[in-house]
Amino acid sequence: MEQRVSVVTLGVGDKEKSRAFYEGMGWKGVGGDGDDPVFFQAGGLVIGLWDRAALAEDSCMEDNGGWGGITLAHNVASPEAVDAAVEVARAAGGTVARDPAKTFWGGYNAVVLDPDGHPWEICHNPHWTLTPDGETRLGT
Amino acid sequence: MEQRVSVVTLGVGDKEKSRAFYEGMGWKGVGGDGDDPVFFQAGGLVIGLWDRAALAEDSCMEDNGGWGGITLAHNVASPEAVDAAVEVARAAGGTVARDPAKTFWGGYNAVVLDPDGHPWEICHNPHWTLTPDGETRLGT
């Protein structure tokens, strides 16, 4: 089995509200008619927004609400870019759960929640490589 | 804010057990000493395994256990490749929550749970493109 992930699907309560948040950050979704998911091409994978109850059923999961042990990160090229991205997310309707600050491991990050409370770490990691294409590579 | 995800971190109860599952599928993790996360280079992003309580705290989340509305998918090139990947995951210690079968939207998929119950959809999607590099592109 190859070492990769193809799709990250986020269960949402209000697809249009969630789509508006991500598009408010400059993303462009496709699809989403009726009960269909909204998809965002994100580099070599796809991020989807789909009704949370439908996703739970499709994933054979019981949904007790809340967080389930998965956190996404969006890495950027500098501490200043973290600050800027957090303000973009806040303006789009995100909730800043933790303000940007230096981390104990030498990085700089913040935590922003999307409209459904899914946490995104906005991060500058000087120990990793961010390519011009936006890919994240382990090591410098 | 660019349209991408840089890191997907999975909260785990037993890092070595979880690492053994993913490495049992042929993946190769780096790091993981002491309390450090294990990281897997997965195309243009990184998949991490980290103590679930540490991840919850770092993500400003309360953890009630269970699923939190995020499902990952691993797409492959054919229905037969779904069957094969499911057997690889089962042999590595995964739980097959839903056996491979045709979907209503014309695909073929299964759901496999990792040792912490994180669901992975193993999927063939004939409406999307899987590149030779393992990237998933919307459309054919």
Image: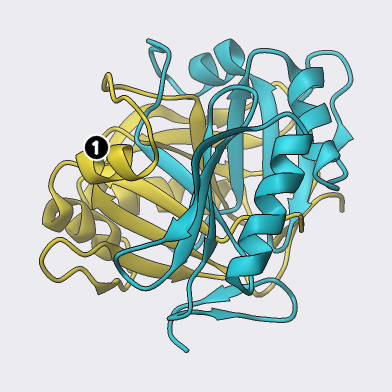
Chain colours: A cyan, B yellow
In the image, residue B89 lies at what x, y percent? Answer: 32, 49
Question: Residue at the bottom extreme?
Answer: A140
B61 vs A15, left or right, is left
Residue shown at 16% from the left, 54% from the top: B15
* Label 1 crowd (10 A; few <14 / some 14-19 / many >=20): some
- Relative to B88, is A56 above or below? above
Residue shown at 24% from the left, 74% from the top: B31
- Relative to A84, is A62 above or below? above
Residue shown at 68% from the left, 43% from the top: A47
- Relative to A128, is B1 above or below? above
Q: Nearer the viewer, residue B18 or A64?
A: A64
B20 vs A4, left or right, is left
**Residue B14 in sight from this viewpoint:** yes
Which residue position is annotated with label 1? Answer: B116
- Relative to A106, is A114 above or below? above
Q: Amino acid at mark 1?
A: Asp
**Residue A3 in sight from this viewpoint:** no
In the image, residue B126 lies at what x, y percent? Answer: 76, 46
B13 vs A15, left or right, is left
Chain letter of the residue beneath label 1 in the structure image = B
State the image quarter where residue B102 is shown. top right
In the image, residue A93 lies at what x, y percent? Answer: 73, 29
Residue shown at 21% from the left, 65% from the top: B36
Q: Nearer the viewer, residue B61 or B66?
A: B61
SS state under label 1: loop
Q: Nearer the viewer, residue B57 or B18?
A: B57
